[in-house]
Amino acid sequence: MKHLIDILRAEHHLESNGYKALLECDDDSVVAYLHEQAREVAQGVFARGIFVRGLVELTNVCRNDCYYCGIRNSNTALERYMLTTEQVLQSCQQGYELGFRTFVLQGGELPRDKAQWLVELVSEIRQRWSDCAITLSLGEWPREVYVALRKAGADRYLLRHESHNAEHYAKLHPAEMSLENRLQCLTWLKELGYQVGTGIMTGSPWQSLDNIVEDIEFIERFKPQMIGLGPFVPQHDTPLGKFATGSAELTCRLYSIFRLMFPNALIPSTTALNTIDVKGRIKGIMAGANVVMPNLSPANVRGNYALYDGKAITNAEAAEGIEQLETQLSTIGYHIDWGRGDHKQCTIHNA
Ligand code: 5AD
């Protein structure tokens, strides 16, 4: 098994059954070796710096109805909010003063007539903080909206594909949504010159290891600059609220596989991971993740951006907890890297 890990590190690629074997392996020493190799590779590229991204949760209003997500349109148990332009700019200002140089505007999928508001918002942020990267995580839009947002100054876009298996995708999403459209959006984003992030929830309902292998192989072909992976965490007001929580262990294993596949990728140790495991963030970094995304949203709306139950919303997850984050990172010999943290062109061939 260790031989497979050595091949993945050297060649950045395995056959399907190699990935499957790594996912199935129950030998702790092999998993420890996988994490160690991934950590070494991450340290080779990023030293021991961890990039921070300031997350602004624009809105929990959503036109979509994904079965797993707490802010799905049909969830009437949720108080909806939408930040004003002024609130968003204030959050960015606060983040900028703290040292953040990337803002991530994340939100539910707004009604289509809000596209112009989004474009103007991005444009304003671009003008005020020309030295910052702007990342969007706002779901599916027609191509022309992605064009306008890019022209307005957005640099990066996160859009998880959620599952590359059409049947599985259809079990997680209502009929109006399709894997095909999701992939189309990802292709457009890439063509338009965004740095693109994609990914999945690990342990989502009905997901098999074979499905994960399909996801790995899609990501291998798509070559995103960012890879977002977190465990599925049930939200009690959703149709999938009674399914089991995903595994931190499997999530970390995937961080390591992707780190060996793409040494330069930006891989966040996600909030969902930190929600299901108090040491999740550190474990993610020890498995090769190199980004964390503290929350810059106004404190009074944080509780309503409830994608899943128990979401970590205070302290180290919040920007005010940045000192705590520094301390936490220093215990493992890491530190915050305050740079914009753009994806470096890969120096290693990932054919
Ligand atoms: N558990 C974990 N992650 C979730 N997301 C949405 N709902 C959940 C959940 N219940 C993730 C999705 C989406 C991202 C914004 O949040 O993968 O892409």
Image: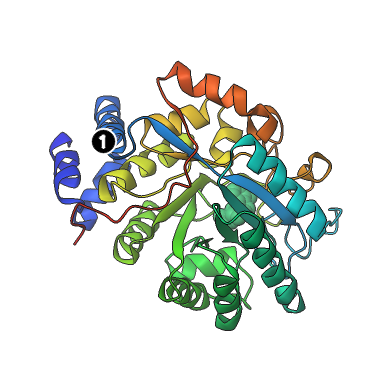
The answer as to whether callout 1 falls within 8 Å of ligand 1 is: no
Q: Is residue 171 left or right of residue 219?
A: right
At a point 25% along the width and 25% down the height, the residue shown is 29
Q: Nearer the viewer, residue 99 or 119?
A: 99
- Going by the numbered disc 1, the residue's amino acid type is Gly
Q: Nearer the viewer, residue 255 or 190?
A: 190
Report the coloring of the rendering.
rainbow
Residue 111 is situated, as x and y percent measured from the top left of the image, at 75, 74
At a point 64% along the width and 34% down the height, the residue shown is 317
Residue 318 is situated, as x and y percent measured from the top left of the image, at 68, 34
Residue 190 is situated, as x and y percent measured from the top left of the image, at 42, 71
Examine the rendered structure and indicate whether residue 194 appears above or below residue 349.
below
Residue that carries the numbered disc 1 in the rendered image: 44
Residue 208 found in image quarter: bottom left
Quadrant where the C terminus is found in the figure: bottom left
At a point 77% along the width and 62% down the height, the residue shown is 61
Q: Nearer the viewer, residue 326 or 230?
A: 326
Q: Is residue 224 left or right of residue 53?
A: left
Residue 121 found in image quarter: bottom right
